[in-house]
Image: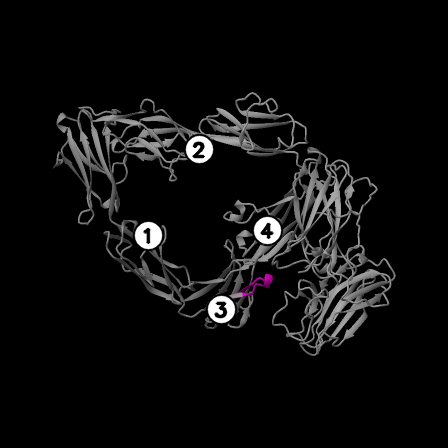
C-alpha cells in the first residue's frame, strides 16, 4: 500500500474590511456533451447544437463566496415537456437521448445569499431529419373543346427537420432542376405543415412514366445522413377506393359476433388497409386482419365508429366508417310535471298533469314506450294523451298527459320501455298519483347544520327530504369552484346522506344539498346547506432551529403557532434533553401568549447546552419546535475560487494545494482558538491531523493553508474543525483533486504530468494525420500490441497518465501526430524544455520537438529529434530554445515502418534559463517535505504584511505514514 507524508504549512490570515472575500455569485455556461460544433475554447456558446438522441451535458461554472447553489430551469420548447415542470439543482445538467421537444432556452441560476443571483442562459437547438413522405396527386382537364384530355401529376414530398432540409428530385438517376423542360416544374407550396417541395409533371408524356426519388438533406449537420423516398409512376397509378360489406350503420344485439369487411375496389400501388375505433382503441379481443374486422361477443361498451382507411400515397386516403350500435337500455327515470300554464307546483284536481318516462338507450330512436294504469294498458281519450319527443324534455321521452285531472285519474302508472324483437330486457318505472303525492321539501336535521370532524376521519353530511315521491339528493360545494367529483358533476345520493372518507383540511367549507328534478316532481329544486369543519393539529415554527451563543450570554427561545383548527394553544410543554422542564428561577418561562410560547435562558453554559423541545397542543393534536442550543462554532466555509490552487513539483510526482476558507459567523460564539485539520487520501484509512492556532478571526477574512507532498494524481478528503473554549465546532469537509495548470503565468512553477483531462492546455493539431492519446496502465487496451509502448508512466504507478501515439492500423508509414502547447509570452532570452520519452519497439519512427514562433505569422522550427528503438525505459531530454517572441512548443510523433512503434512522453517542464549539463536519474524525484509558500490573491483594497510560522504536529508522525523511500 502506498504511504504518504504531508507537510502542512503555516496559516496565513488575510485581513479584509467589510464583507471581506464574500462575493455575489457569478456564472458561466459551458457544454461538455455531444455537441455538433464545439468551439476550440469550449466556452459558453449562446447556441448549443446537438443531434436528437444524443446526450446533452451543460455545466454551470460558478464563482462567489460562499459557494453558490445552482438551479437549472427551462423555457420555450413544447408545453408537454416534463422538464419544464421541475428544476434540476446541480451544477451539471444531463439529459440522455434528448428529444426535439426538449430544445429551447435553458437557464442556470446561481445564488449564495450575497447580492443578486447570477442568471445565464443558453439556447439548445436539437437537430433532426425524419423520413420523407411522398404523395401523388393527379388532375385531368379537357383541352380544345373536349377533343383530348391533359393529365397533370403532382409529386409532393414533405419532411420534418431542423435545420430546414434541402430537396433534390431525381428521375431514375438523373437530377431534375426547376424548369428543366416544359413538362417539369418544381416549387414550394404555401400554407403547408413541415417542409414541402412539389414536382409538377405537366401534360404527362410517355417518358414521364418512371421512377422518381425525393432526396432530403440537412447538409450532414451533426452527422445526420441524407434520406430518400422513391415512387414508381405508371399509367395505372390511381388512388385507393373502398366499399363495405355492411351498411354504414350496423345495429346488433349484445353477445353477437360481428364481422365487417372492407373491400378494395381500386388503387395502384396496392393500398394498405387499417382499422381504427373512435373514441379509444379497438375493443379487447377485436381482430383486424387486412380488410376484415372481427369482434367476438360484442357488448354495449363496444358501440362507436369504426373506420377503415386505405392509403397508397396517391391522392387522398379512402375512408369508410361503420357506426356500430349495440342495443342496450339503462337509467329509467320519471318526472311529474304539474300544470305548467298555471305555474303550479302541486297536483290539483281540475288542472293538467304530465307524467314523463325516459331511458338511455342505443339506438335511442328505436325504443318504444307503453303506459299502464293500475296494471292495465292506459286507454287514449280526450283527457288522456300519450306524446313522444316533448321539446321540453330529453330526446325520445314518452309523456302521458292528463287533461283536467279527475279523482278517477288517481292510481298507479307504469311506464315500460322495450326494444321490439330484440333480446334486451325491458325497463320499467312506476309512478303513484294520489292526493298524497306532494312536491318535495328539504331541510337539515336539528344539530346537523355544522359537522366537526378531525382530519383523516370519515364524515357524514345529512339532509332530510320529505314529499311523495322522494327524489334523489344532489350534493355540491358552495364555496369552491371544484366539484366533489373529478367529472365535475354533483354527487347523487338516494338517502340524502353524503359520506366522505378520510377528510382533509381543504375539504372544510359549505356544502349544498338540493332535490333532483327527476324521479320526482319536475319543479324548482329545493336546497339547504351544511357546514363542514375539519380540525387538524397545529403547525409551528420553527420546526427546527440551531441556536448559537457565546458562553454566559442569554438566549430567548420562541415557538409560534402558524395554523391549526382550532387556531389556539391549549397547552405548551418544554423539555430539555427529553426531561420535562419545571420553572426554576434560573430558567423562567414567560407568560403564555395565545399564538406562541417562550423560554428564556439567562446564560448559555455547558450544562444548559443541548436539545430543547416545545410541544404545542390545540386539543386535536400537537406539534413541536426543536432548538439545538450550544456555544459551538459554526463550520468553516471553504473558498472554491482560489486561482490555480494546485502546484506541481518538478521531477517528482508530488503536488501542493492552496487551501483557503472563511469562518461562518465568527462573532456568534466565543473567539476561535485553533482549527484541527485532517487530511486523508481517498480509498485509504489513515488520516493525518494537525492543529492550526489562530488569532482573532473576522467575518469575511480569508484564511489560507498550504498542503504539500500530495501524491499525483490522487485526491484527498480534507476536514476542518474550529475550536473555541466551548470545544469542537461544526466540521466542514471537501475533496481536493489534482488538476494540472493551463498556461501558467510562471512557467517554472509547474510540470505537466498529463494527469488532468485538459492536459495543461495542450491541443491536438488539426493539420496532422492522427492524434496523441492520453492513457495510463488502468486504461490501456488489453489487446494492445506487445513489445512496444511503456507499461506505466514515469512514476511507475498504475494511476499515472502519459501521452502516446498508437501506430497500429489504420496508421501508415510517415503519418504524423502533433501535440501543441498553449501560447507562451517570451519574457526571457533562453528557455529549457525538459521531458521524459519512451521509444520502445522495432518499428519506432521519430519523435521531434518543434518551436512555433508567433512573432510574424506561424513559423515552425525543429529544436530536437530522435529516431529508432531506445529500449523499454523512460529517458529524459533537455532541449534549449531561444524564441524571439510569443511561442508554442510542438511534440511531433512520426509513425515508423510497422505497428510496433508506439512513442510516449511524460512530465514536460518549460523553465527560464539554460538547461542543466548533467542529466538527472528519471526514476528519482525531488526530496520530499520541502516547505513551500504561496501568497494568496484576495479582494481587498489594502495590503497587509503577511507572516508565517511552520507548525509542529500535535503528535509525532507514526511510522506507517512516513514518506516511502525513493
Q: Which mark is residue 305?
A: 1
Task: State how far apart marks 4 and 3 are (Cα).
Answer: 45 Å
Task: State how far apart marks 4 and 2 are (Cα).
Answer: 37 Å
Q: Position of residue 410 (x, y in %)?
A: 15, 28
Q: Who comes first in sequence, dot 4 or dot 1?
A: 4
Q: Who comes first in sequence, dot 2 or dot 1?
A: 1
Q: Please, what secondary structure does the residue beneath circle 1 have?
A: strand
Q: How is the image coloured?
A: one colour
Q: Which residues are magenta?
A: 213-226
Q: Who comes first in sequence, dot 4 or dot 2?
A: 4
Task: State how far apart marks 3 and 2 are (Cα).
Answer: 66 Å
**Badge 4 density bin: few <14, some 14–19, many ≥20, Cα 10 Å:** many
Which residue corresponds to mark 2? 506
Q: Is residue 245 left or right of residue 454?
A: left
Q: Is residue 89 left or right of residue 820?
A: left
Q: Position of residue 347 (x, y in %)?
A: 21, 25
For the residues bearing labels 4 and 3, Cβ distance under 8 angstroms: no
Q: Which mark is residue 212?
A: 3
Amino acid at each position: 500500500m502506498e504511504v504518504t507524508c504531508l507537510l502542512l504549512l503555516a496559516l496565513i490570515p488575510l485581513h479584509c474590511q467589510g464583507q471581506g472575500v464574500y462575493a455575489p455569485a457569478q456564472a458561466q455556461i459551458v457544454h461538455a456533451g455531444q455537441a455538433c460544433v464545439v468551439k476550440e475554447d469550449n466556452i459558453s456558446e449562446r447556441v448549443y447544437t446537438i443531434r436528437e438522441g444524443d446526450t446533452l451535458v451543460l455545466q454551470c461554472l460558478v464563482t462567489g463566496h460562499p459557494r453558490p447553489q445552482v438551479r437549472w430551469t427551462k423555457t420555450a420548447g413544447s408545453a408537454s415537456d416534463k422538464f419544464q415542470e421541475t428544476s434540476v439543482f446541480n451544477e451539471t445538467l444531463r439529459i440522455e437521448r434528448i428529444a426535439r421537444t426538449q430544445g429551447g432556452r435553458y437557464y442556470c441560476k446561481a445564488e449564495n445569499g450575497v447580492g443578486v443571483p447570477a442568471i445565464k442562459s443558453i439556447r439548445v437547438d436539437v437537430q433532426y431529419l425524419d423520413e420523407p413522405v411522398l404523395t401523388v396527386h393527379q388532375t385531368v382537364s379537357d383541352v380544345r373543346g373536349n377533343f383530348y384530355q391533359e393529365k397533370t401529376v403532382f409529386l409532393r414530398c414533405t419532411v420534418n427537420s431542423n435545420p430546414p432540409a434541402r430537396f433534390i428530385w431525381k428521375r431514375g438517376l438523373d437530377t431534375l432542376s426547376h424548369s428543366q423542360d416544359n413538362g417539369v416544374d418544381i416549387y414550394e407550396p404555401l400554407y403547408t405543415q413541415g417542409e414541402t417541395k412539389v414536382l409538377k409533371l405537366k401534360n404527362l408524356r410517355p417518358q414521364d412514366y418512371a421512377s422518381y426519388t425525393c432526396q432530403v438533406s440537412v447538409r450532414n449537420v451533426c452527422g445526420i445522413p441524407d434520406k430518400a423516398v422513391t415512387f414508381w409512376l405508371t399509367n395505372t397509378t390511381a388512388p385507393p377506393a373502398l366499399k363495405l360489406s355492411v351498411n354504414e350503420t350496423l345495429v346488433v344485439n349484445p353477445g353477437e359476433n360481428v364481422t365487417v369487411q372492407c373491400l378494395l375496389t381500386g388503387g395502384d400501388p396496392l393500398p394498405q388497409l387499417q382499422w381504427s375505433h373512435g373514441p379509444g382503441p379497438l375493443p379487447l379481443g377485436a381482430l383486424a386482419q387486412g380488410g376484415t374486422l372481427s369482434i367476438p361477443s360484442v357488448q354495449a361498451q363496444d358501440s362507436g365508429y369504426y373506420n377503415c382507411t386505405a392509403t397508397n400515397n396517391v391522392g387522398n386516403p379512402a375512408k369508410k366508417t361503420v357506426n356500430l350500435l349495440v342495443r342496450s337500455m339503462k337509467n329509467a327515470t320519471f318526472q311529474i310535471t304539474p300544470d305548467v300554464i298555471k305555474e303550479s307546483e302541486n297536483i290539483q284536481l281540475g288542472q293538467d298533469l304530465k307524467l314523463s318516462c325516459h331511458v338511455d338507450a342505443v339506438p335511442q330512436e328505436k325504443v318504444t314506450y307503453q303506459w299502464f294504469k293500475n296494471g292495465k294498458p292506459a286507454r287514449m281519450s280526450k283527457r288522456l294523451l300519450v306524446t313522444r319527443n316533448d321539446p321540453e324534455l330529453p330526446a325520445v321521452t314518452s309523456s302521458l298527459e292528463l287533461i283536467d285531472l279527475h279523482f278517477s285519474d288517481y292510481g298507479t302508472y307504469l311506464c315500460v320501455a322495450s326494444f321490439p324483437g330484440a333480446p334486451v330486457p325491458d325497463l320499467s318505472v312506476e309512478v303513484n298519483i294520489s292526493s298524497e303525492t306532494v312536491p318535495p321539501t328539504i331541510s337539515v336535521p336539528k344539530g346537523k347544520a355544522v359537522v366537526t370532524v378531525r382530519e383523516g376521519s370519515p364524515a357524514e353530511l345529512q339532509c332530510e327530504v320529505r314529499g311523495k315521491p322522494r327524489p334523489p339528493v344532489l350534493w355540491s360545494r358552495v364555496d369552491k369552484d371544484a366539484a366533489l367529483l373529478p367529472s365535475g358533476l354533483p354527487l347523487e345520493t338516494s338517502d340524502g346522506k353524503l359520506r366522505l372518507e378520510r377528510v382533509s383540511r381543504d375539504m372544510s367549507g359549505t356544502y349544498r344539498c338540493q332535490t333532483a328534478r327527476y324521479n320526482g316532481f319536475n319543479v324548482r329544486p329545493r336546497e339547504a346547506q351544511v357546514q363542514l369543519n375539519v380540525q387538524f393539529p397545529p403547525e409551528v415554527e420553527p420546526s427546527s432551529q440551531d441556536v448559537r451563543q457565546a458562553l454566559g450570554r442569554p438566549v430567548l427561545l420562541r415557538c409560534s403557532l402558524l395554523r391549526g383548527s382550532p387556531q389556539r394553544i391549549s397547552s405548551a410543554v418544554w423539555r430539555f434533553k427529553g426531561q420535562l422542564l419545571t420553572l426554576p428561577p434560573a430558567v423562567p418561562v414567560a407568560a403564555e401568549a395565545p399564538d406562541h410560547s417562550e423560554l428564556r435562558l439567562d446564560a448559555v453554559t455547558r450544562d444548559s447546552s443541548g436539545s430543547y423541545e416545545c410541544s404545542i397542543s390545540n386539543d386535536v393534536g400537537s406539534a413541536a419546535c426543536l432548538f439545538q442550543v450550544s456555544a459551538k462554532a459554526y463550520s468553516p466555509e471553504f473558498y472554491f475560487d482560489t486561482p490555480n490552487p494546485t502546484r506541481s513539483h518538478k521531477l517528482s510526482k508530488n503536488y501542493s494545494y492552496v487551501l483557503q476558507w472563511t469562518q461562518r459567523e465568527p462573532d456568534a460564539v466565543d473567539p476561535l482558538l485553533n482549527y484541527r485539520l485532517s487530511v486523508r487520501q481517498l480509498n485509504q484509512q489513515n488520516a493525518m491531523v494537525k492543529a492550526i492556532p489562530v488569532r482573532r478571526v473576522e467575518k469575511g477574512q480569508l484564511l489560507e493553508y498550504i498542503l504539500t507532498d500530495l501524491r499525483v494524481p490522487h485526491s484527498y478528503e480534507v476536514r476542518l474543525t474550529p475550536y473555541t473554549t466551548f470545544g469542537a465546532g461544526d466540521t466542514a469537509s471537501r475533496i481536493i483533486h489534482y488538476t494540472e495548470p493551463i498556461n501558467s503565468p510562471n512557467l517554472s512553477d509547474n510540470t505537466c504530468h498529463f494527469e488532468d483531462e485538459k492536459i495543461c492546455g495542450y491541443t491536438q493539431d488539426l493539420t496532422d494525420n492522427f492524434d496523441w492519446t492520453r492513457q495510463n496502465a488502468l486504461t490501456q487496451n488489453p489487446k494492445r500490441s506487445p513489445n512496444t509502448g511503456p507499461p506505466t508512466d514515469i512514476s511507475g504507478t498504475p494511476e499515472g497518465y502519459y501521452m502516446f501515439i498508437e501506430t497500429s492500423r489504420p496508421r501508415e508509414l510517415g503519418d504524423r501526430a502533433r501535440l501543441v502547447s498553449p501560447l507562451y509570452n517570451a519574457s526571457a532570452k533562453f528557455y529549457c524544455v525538459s521531458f521524459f520519452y519512451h521509444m520502445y519497439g522495432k518499428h519506432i519512427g521519430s519523435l521531434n520537438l518543434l518551436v512555433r514562433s508567433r512573432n510574424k505569422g506561424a513559423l515552425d522550427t525543429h529544436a530536437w529529434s530522435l529516431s529508432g528503438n531506445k529500449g523499454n525505459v523512460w529517458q529524459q531530454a533537455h532541449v534549449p530554445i531561444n524564441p524571439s517572441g510569443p511561442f508554442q512548443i510542438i511534440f511531433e510523433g512520426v509513425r515508423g515502418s510497422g505497428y510496433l512503434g508506439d512513442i510516449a512522453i511524460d512530465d514536460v517542464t518549460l523553465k527560464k534559463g539554460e538547461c542543466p549539463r548533467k542529466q538527472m536519474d528519471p526514476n528519482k524525484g525531488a526530496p520530499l517535505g520541502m516547505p513551500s509558500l504561496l501568497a494568496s490573491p484576495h479582494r481587498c483594497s489594502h495590503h497587509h504584511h503577511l507572516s508565517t510560522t511552520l507548525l509542529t504536529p500535535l503528535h509525532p508522525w507514526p511510522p506507517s505514514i512516513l514518506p516511502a523511500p525513493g
